[in-house]
């Protein structure tokens, strides 16, 4: 929006309002083009109970809780997604997100989507159904006697510290889970360190911006479920290469493998309905929020279709046909460094005249 670029993405909702204000000014060099809500975040539990990441006694106890359906539902219902979204930006941008495939994408089916909305009372009931109780009266749930010393349930929450959106969401999740009686320690790491920690399995839960397979399904399809020892973002094999899939996870794997093998569009659509139901009903990941991104397009450019998405199998300029973009004569400016010249041969003194 400062005029230093020609074509880019706007993906951080904290910047939406100011960017819209600037783009509305007469001297703004660029315009904004918002698309569908295909950016979203989820809260993923570490579902490996088989030793991935070499968990200690506390971490292993958390893994067992994560594999308990009541515990996952309790966590989902402890999250006030409306309040979480408003912590990022006010207005119509943010939508509550159940998890799985995004609404508005090709394979999404609303009837196959199960949503566990915010309810602190229901959240606590599910946490207690998972075997938790506040045995010491300090306002936080304890592990059952004989598990992790019967101490308070303490989770670690992994988050990418390079982006303000990730940090804002994680801080909101910490506060909301503590309201429900679950203590959470935030583990904020830079991108590479976060990736290494995630891939090593040394975490309990993570706030994660969903990857592109949630948008397109046909890209990186094997990553939609634990189809192999290291394909899943939140359930991987131990050092011996063993996966300990829950029954519904195995169903997800079977559905994804059938989808990959099928070439029938109708069958594929039905399989993704089954996938969405398994994902959201069992909370493979707890959806948080989803929102649109925008293309930032310099006003000099012509022939970029209205409604061009921020992501169409690739991001930004790769989502359009770049060869069709041009600058009308009356908007052309003298940006050429070497006009009427051609690149010189390797090792030569430089550009040469076209004639």
Image (cartoon, helix red, strand yellow):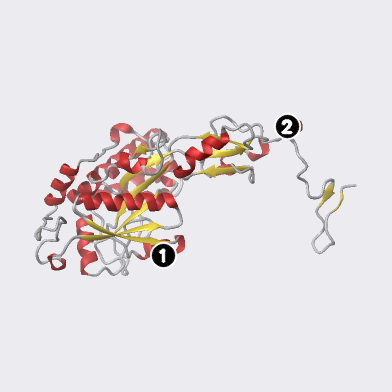
Residue 282: image location, x then y, percent: 24, 46
Which SS class for mark 1? helix
Q: What numbered label is drawn on residue 196?
A: 1
Q: Quadrant of residue 281?
A: top left
Residue 334: image location, x then y, percent: 78, 42
What residue appears at the point 53 percent right and 31 percent down from the top-left corner?
307
Q: Is residue 332 left or right of residue 297?
A: right
Relative to 294, residue 62 above or below = below
Q: CA distance from mark 1 to mark 2?
A: 47 Å
Q: Quadrant of residue 351?
A: bottom right
Q: Is residue 309 visible?
A: no
Q: Is residue 260 left or right of residue 131?
A: right
Q: What numbered label is drawn on residue 154?
A: none
Residue 209: image location, x then y, percent: 40, 49
Q: Is residue 131 left or right of residue 110?
A: left
Q: Residue furthest right?
A: 355
Q: Is residue 71 left or right of residue 224?
A: left
What residue appears at the point 29 percent right and 49 percent down from the top-left corner?
284
Which SS class for mark 2? loop
Q: What numbered label is drawn on residue 328?
A: 2
Comparing labels 1 and 2, the label whose residue is closer to the camera:
2
What residue appears at the point 50 percent right and 35 percent down from the top-left corner?
34
């Amino acid at each position: 929006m400062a005029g230093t670029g020609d074509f880019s993405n706007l993906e951080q909702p904290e910047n939406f309002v100011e960017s819209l204000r600037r783009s509305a000014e007469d001297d703004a060099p660029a315009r904004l083009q918002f698309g569908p809500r295909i950016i979203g975040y989820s809260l993923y539990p570490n579902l490996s109970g088989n030793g991935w990441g070499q968990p200690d006694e506390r971490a292993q106890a958390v893994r067992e809780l994560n594999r308990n359906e009541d515990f996952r539902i309790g966590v989902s219902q402890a999250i006030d997604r409306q309040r979480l979204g408003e912590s990022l930006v006010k207005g119509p941008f943010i939508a509550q997100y159940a998890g799985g495939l995004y609404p508005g994408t090709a394979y999404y089916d609303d009837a196959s989507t199960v949503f566990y909305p915010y309810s602190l009372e229901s959240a606590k009931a599910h946490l207690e159904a998972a075997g938790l109780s506040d045995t010491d009266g300090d306002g936080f749930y304890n592990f059952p006697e004989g598990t992790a010393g019967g101490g308070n349930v303490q989770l670690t929450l992994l988050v990418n510290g390079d982006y303000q959106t990730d940090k804002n969401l994680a801080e909101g999740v910490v506060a909301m889970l503590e309201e429900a009686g679950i203590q959470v320690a935030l583990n904020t790491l830079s991108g590479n360190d976060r990736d290494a920690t995630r891939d090593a399995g040394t975490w309990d839960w993570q706030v994660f911006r969903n990857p592109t397979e949630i948008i397109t399904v046909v890209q990186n399809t094997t990553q939609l479920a634990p189809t192999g020892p290291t394909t899943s973002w939140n359930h991987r094999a131990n050092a011996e290469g063993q996966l300990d899939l829950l029954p519904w996870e195995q169903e997800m794997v079977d559905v994804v493998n059938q989808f990959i093998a099928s070439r029938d569009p109708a069958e594929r659509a039905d399989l993704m309905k089954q996938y969405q139901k398994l994902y959201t009903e069992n909370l493979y990941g707890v959806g948080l929020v989803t929102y649109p991104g925008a293309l930032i397009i310099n006003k000099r450019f012509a022939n970029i279709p209205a409604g061009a998405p921020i992501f169409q199998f690739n991001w930004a300029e790769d989502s359009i046909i770049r060869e069709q973009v041009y600058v009308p004569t009356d908007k052309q400016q003298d940006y050429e460094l070497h006009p009427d010249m051609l690149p010189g041969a390797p090792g030569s003194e430089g550009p040469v005249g076209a004639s």
